Image (spheres, grey):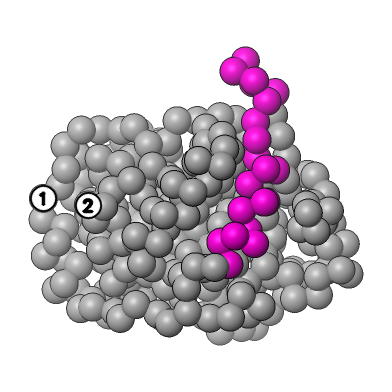
Amino acid sequence: MAGRRLRLTARAGGARRRWRGAGLLLAGLLGCRDPQPAIPAQSATLGQWVWSARDSSLLVASRREFPALRAGVWLATLSRRGDSLVTALGRPLDASVGADASVVIRLDDSFSTWWGTESPDTLAARLEPRIARLLQLAERGGGARPVQLDHDAPVARLAEYAALVARLRRPGGVLHDHPLWITSLVAHLADPGYGARFRPLVDGHIIQLFDTGERHTIARERELLARAERAAMPFQLGVGAFERRLTSGPTTHRAWFDVLPRAERSRWYRGAWIFPGGAAYRTYLHR
């Protein structure tokens, strides 16, 4: 998501060695979850991420037109600093976000420097106490909130990342009782085994279409939808309402709003999340 990184980053690179024991964890820790059935498009989620005070104001204003608009609140970012895991707290969960708000826990790009040097079990042991404390804050006065785990895992490290998610979701794990969605990139979906890796572990994935270097074209849109269909797991689309002027030319974030009605044809489609980046967006939902 973008308030944490209003810059262009190349997310699909990374270290080059796969951790080869991931498949054992996927089956052994969790067993298999059956693919979820399709739902009517009108039942799909429409959500807005809240990364700033301006985003909070946009959420309140947008709910006048879209009363069912859900909030996805940036709870914290976890980063590597030296050999330590550092927590940067995000936005408060005040009454304006609603009882059904999801919380976003970001593992930033520095976290990826641990892949290949520490095992998924070791990384899970680092993460679990931090995540548990964050969720205690988020759950005051409510039950288990949905969690969005936001990490731009390098493509070469997807097996390790899946093993980490499996560890966090095992019986007794910190995320076992929480509905869990993960961030996906279009580059992730190029891996034919992506769905098989993550389908047993999560409730679904949110495909990010802003600040990833993805330029909207009709051909790229078709490729995205085909890859999402091949993954055969519930998906939502993450779109940005802001644009940037880069040396390579302006971004095409808002053009991705046009894919939303076409995505509704997929039996796996579960809705959309909007990252305002400080920009109003209601008109883009009527195009």
Give me the residue at 63% from left, 80% from top: 43
Name the image quarter holding the C terminus.
bottom right
Q: Can residue 146 be seen in this view?
A: yes
Percent position (x, y) of residue 81?
40, 36
Span highlighted in magenta in the image: 245-264
The answer to whether the residue labelled 2 contacts the one labelled 1, judged by CB atoms less than 8 Å apart, is yes
| Residue 248 higher or lower than 62, as above or below | above
Question: Circle 2 is placed at which residue position?
Answer: 159
Viewer-proximal residue among 60 and 106: 60
Q: In which quarter of the image is residue 139?
A: bottom right
Q: Quadrant of residue 42?
A: bottom right
- Graded by Cα atoms within 10 Å as few (under 14), some (14 to 19) or many (20 or more), the crowding at tag 2 reads many
Type of the residue with mark 2: Ala
Give me the residue at 15% from left, 47% from top: 19
Residue 132 as seen in the image, left or right of residue 216: left
Q: Earlier in the sequence, mark 2 or mark 1?
A: 1
Question: Circle 1 is placed at which residue position?
Answer: 20
Viewer-proximal residue among 33 and 94: 33
Residue 197 as seen in the image, left or right of residue 182: left
* Membership of 159 in magenta stretch: no
